[in-house]
Every structure is written in structure tokens, then in C-alpha cells.
Amino acid sequence: MELILDRVSKQYQNKIAVDRISLKLQEGVYGLLGANGAGKTTLMRMICGILRPTGGTITFDGLDVSCEDYRSILGYLPQDFGYYPDFTGMDFLLYMAALKGLPKSCAKRRAAQLLELVDLRDKARQKIRTYSGGMKQRLGIAQALINDPKLLVLDEPTAGLDPKERVRFRNMIAKIGKENIVLLSTHILSDIEHIADTVLMMKSGQLIYQGNRENGRKDLESFYMEQFEEE
Amino acid sequence: MRQLIFYETKKLLGRKANQIAMLLGFLLVIICSAMQIQGETLTIDGQELKGAAAVLKQQEIESLLTDELDEEFLTAFLQEYQRQIIGNPSGYSYSLIESKSNLFSLLAKNYTEWNEHFDWETLNKIPSEGGLAFYDRRMEKIETLLNADYSYGNYTEAEKQYWLKKAGAVSTPFQWGGRSTWSIIWNSIGMLFYQFLVVGLCIAPVFAGECQNRTDALILSTKYGKNRAIIAKLLVSFAFSFFYIALCGLVSVGINVVLLGTEGWDLPIQLWDTIFPYEWTVIRACIVNLGIMILIALLLTAFSLMLSAISKNPVIVLAADVLLFFGTAFLPSSKSSGLWNKIVYLVPLHCSDLQNVLKSYNDYPFGNLIISHLGMMSLVYTLLAVFFTFCAGKSFQKYRG
């Protein structure tokens, strides 16, 4: 299982959002760090096939990012995304399951499992407009997992979660990361410290750090702070 | 795919704004139908009848006149009127005309030039001594229309032959009966034009709403987000527009049929205007008119979907819909450019008025090939709808952040 980014770039008119990033990711949890505007979200959207790179290629086990099979192994939780207020939690998951090509019977079983996992089973038949911010975020996590993704891309996944939910979430991600590739973007260093095997750091569209969490932990914190201080 | 269609339908019909718009749309249909019937009046022996009673009474009186408009009957009918009107200083008597106004107006129109509005005084001027020659006059009027000198270009010989052949093939003498009920039904279908606002309002958020909800990125990252999801949205949107307009049409026709009955459904459309060049019954004309409404709704849907996929704001989509579908009705005709006029004839509001389309004798000649107004409208609208739909799908695939 290997996600390969080969000199991936994204340019908007005169602004280079992502600048020739090359990466090889295998099973494990990858924490993507960077200040606002560093290009994290743009990079993640390109990995998810939402944005087309202006240069370079992205492949997963030889599958190009633009093909349907690539997207079928993908789970994505965007930062700050919306829901359909008139859908129930169950409706939303079943809709996402249909978009991801799961058969109806399998989708129902999987949706029920995930609602249990994110502690929303009792609220499954309630309209999303009645959900709190944390409940919506948990529903978002559930939809990202509904197709058992081999590549899970999470943009600020712990935003809005209370401390207890955050711990549950970290454990869940750590477990998924043992057999799949999880790319996690966050501003919260403690999330990275607890679950990321590898840390990736971006600045001004470039990858400026890639290293093992355990080896570089002390260096990482100070290095990360240095980047912010410069700005 | 069925699941995606189910959830897209749920999104479209579940939106509160859409539900309110549809409810108001149906109310408008009911109000328009009721008002149209309520506006009818008829005075018989000094007693004024209103609404359905007036329509049904006129229907009854006129249907008893004859079964067929042969020359003998028409001549006798008009001579009787002309005898009664002698010495009347106003030149006509509405009290004599009122209960049989459909037949009198048909006579008056047939003897009025194609580019003039008829008035009741015409009835007194029609020469009836040696017989009316009603059907000869009909063809003469059509020939005058085709041979007239137009500043923006005249009919070619091929066009003239095309129309004369069509108009000449209409069976005569015309079958006659009470046509009051079906006049109201036909008019009520034309009033469905206002329902396009509802269609535009409901379709505008199909793609733009995903941007506003910030769910577009999520959809586009899924397996079927760039293909089947878009197809499902398109199918649901077109199905919605089709069924909504069809349902409005059925409600409108249904109300009239319940109140007025169905008598007269098989009458020829020439009872509305003798120069109509197609041999259709009025029920067929109503179905064609409803079909035109549905075709316009489908074009509007495709246009709205394209704008919805390009723009992030449903309000912009709705504003563009209003401009294109209602604003174009104010485009002026040209006195010098036939091409411009042919384009203007194709704007939706003009096309929705089938009675006007039928008597306009507008066509689109390509050498010896003549395409009728309805044929050209169907062709152009279908091509545009396909193009807009293609653009809608392609635009949504491109994430706009």
C-alpha cells in the first residue's frame, strides 16, 4: 500500500499554493502541520482528487488520483464542511454510502456500526439541524470511515470535539493507521504527538520537514514554534 | 444509482423554500382557473349569469345551432343577424351576439384581414347575398398573408407552397359545437408560464446549494461524486420540472373539467381561428401546448443547472432565469431584419402562446427544406438543453473552493 506524490504543485495565477511536493506514504498515521495558508488544505484536496494539480502526479498503488477506483478507497473529512439540515444522521451516512458505491444492505449495517462507534446511535433518526457542533463533527468522521478507506484524509478532525471524544478519536485513528494510510492535518500539536507516526510540516507551499515523531519530538516542537515566530 | 436518485429527490423536495414555492404555485393554478371561470358572464332575457353557469349556458346554446359549419348554415345564420341589425346606428347589437359570440367572432375574424383586429361591425359588412363562400375566404386570407410585402423579407415560393398545402389539407366544412369550455381550458394551459418561476426557484440550488452548504468538496471526493452523483442530480431536476409542470397542467385542466365538463374536446382548432394550418382537435392542441410548456421548463431547468454549477449563489441563478425567460418577451421585432425576428419568435414567452404560434405562419427555411415554428423550437430547445446540461456537469466537476 503506497501513496506517491511526485513533484505535486498547485498554482493560482501568481500564487503558488503547493510547490513541487514529493512524498511516499505507506501504512501509518501522518500528521501534517503548518501555519494557516501553508498549503495543507490545498495539498489534501489534491490528494482527494477534488483539485487538479497544475504539475506532478498522485497515485495510490498505481491508481491515478483522477480515476474512480482511486476515490473508492478514499475517506475524506474536509475542514468546516456543511450538512443537509433536513437529513437525519442515518440518511446522511446512507447518502454518503451511496456516493461511495456501497450496496444498500451493506451500507445500512455499516452506518449502524459507525453511528454506534461515534456515539450517535440514539440520535440516528434525528435531523442534523438538531445536532450540536461536536455531534456534526462525529458524524463527519463516521462518513469518512463508511467505506473502510485504505487512504483516510482528515482536515482538522478534532475541531469541536470535547476532551473525552478527542481521546476516543485518537484511539480510533491509531487503530485504523495500523493497516491503512491516514493523513491528518491539525493545528493541535498534542493530537500529532499522540497518534502520528510521522510528522510532515509545510510552509509557503513547500514541505520543510518530514520525520519520525519519536526521534524528533523535542526538535519538532521548537522547530514548529520557530516557523510561527518567523511569521 | 437508485439510492442516489432517492437522496437527490429528498434534497430537492425536502427544502422548505421549494415546498413553499410549490404550494404557492399550485395555489396560483387554482386561483387562475377559478378567476378565469368566475370572469365569464352571459345575459339571457335580461338575467345575468356568471361563472360556470354562464359558460355552460353558452356551450348549450351554441351546440344546438348546428353540427357542421356548412356554407348553407353559415349564410342563413349571418343573413338572419344582418336582417335584425338593419337600422341599428351602432352597426352591431351585442345582445344578439352575446350568447353565440364564439360563432359570430369566428365569422368576423374570417372576414377581417390577417393583420387587423376584428370588430363586431364587420359582421354587418360581410356580403352574404350570393352565399358566404366562407372556406374560399379562409384560403384567400391565408394567401394574402403569404403574399404580403414585408419590410424584413417575404415568403419564398417554397414557404408559400408549404403553408398552402398544410392549410388546404384541413377538412371542411368544420365540425361545430360549444367551444366555451375548451377555450377556458386552452387559455389555462397558457397561464402555466408563471410556474416557470417555481421551477427556477427549485432548481437554482441543485449545484449552487452544495457550494453554499460546503458539501461540494465532500461529494467530489467520493467514488461516484464526479459522475453518477451529477447524473442523479440532473435526472432528478429534469424529472421534477417535467412532473411539476405536467401536474400543474393536470390540476388546471382537472378543475375546469370538473366544473365545466369535457364536451367539445374533439372540435377542430379552426373554430378558434380559421387560418390555423393544422388539422388538430382542440384536445390535441391542449396537449401540444402542455408539451411546449414542459419543453420550455426543461430548457429552463438545463439553463438553471448550468448557472447553478457555475455560480455559487442560487439568487444569481434565479435572477438570470427571470431575465432570460421573462425579460426576452420585451425584445422588439425588427422592421428590417427577418433573421432577428425569427430569433425573437423562438423566445420562450412567444413559444408558450400556441394560438399565436399557429396563426403566425412563421417558419425556418433552409433552401427547399421548411421547418415549422414548432419543429424549430423543439430542435433548438433540445440542442440548447443538451448543451447547458453538458456544461452543468462539467462545471460541477471543477471544484471552485
Image (spheres, coloured by chain):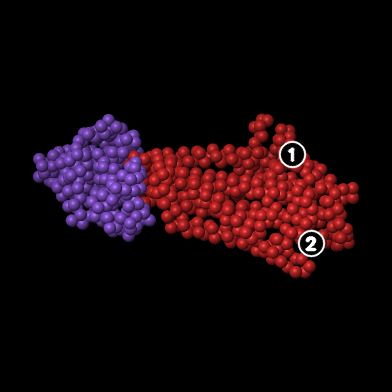
Chain colours: A purple, B red
Between B324 and B383, the residue placed more toward the observer is B383
| SS for callout 1 | loop
Please name the residue that numbered disc 1 is placed on. Answer: B169
| SS for callout 2 | helix
What is the x, y in percent for residue B350?
62, 47
What is the x, y in percent for residue A184?
22, 44
Q: Is residue A205 above or below residue B212?
A: above
Tell which tag, 2 or 1, sits nearer the viewer: 1
Instruction: Tell me the quarter of the picture where residue A64 sits.
Output: top left
Between discs 2 and 1, the one toward the N terminus = 2
Name which residue lies at 50% across and 44% down: B302
Q: Is residue B115 visible?
A: no
Three-letter code for the amino acid on which mark 2 is drawn: Tyr
Name which residue lies at 27% across and 52% down: A115
Query: Is B226 situated left or right of B110 in this image?
Result: left
Instruction: Tell me the quarter of the picture where residue B179 sits.
Output: bottom right
Please name the residue that numbered disc 2 is placed on. Answer: B94
Q: Residues within 10 Å of mark 1 (few under 14, many from 20)?
A: few
The C terminus of chain B is located in which quarter? top left
Tally of marks? 2
Instruction: Tell me the quarter of the picture where residue A38 sits.
Output: top left
Between B74 and B119, the residue placed more toward the observer is B74
Name which residue lies at 65% across and 52% down: B186
The N terminus of chain B is located in which quarter? top left
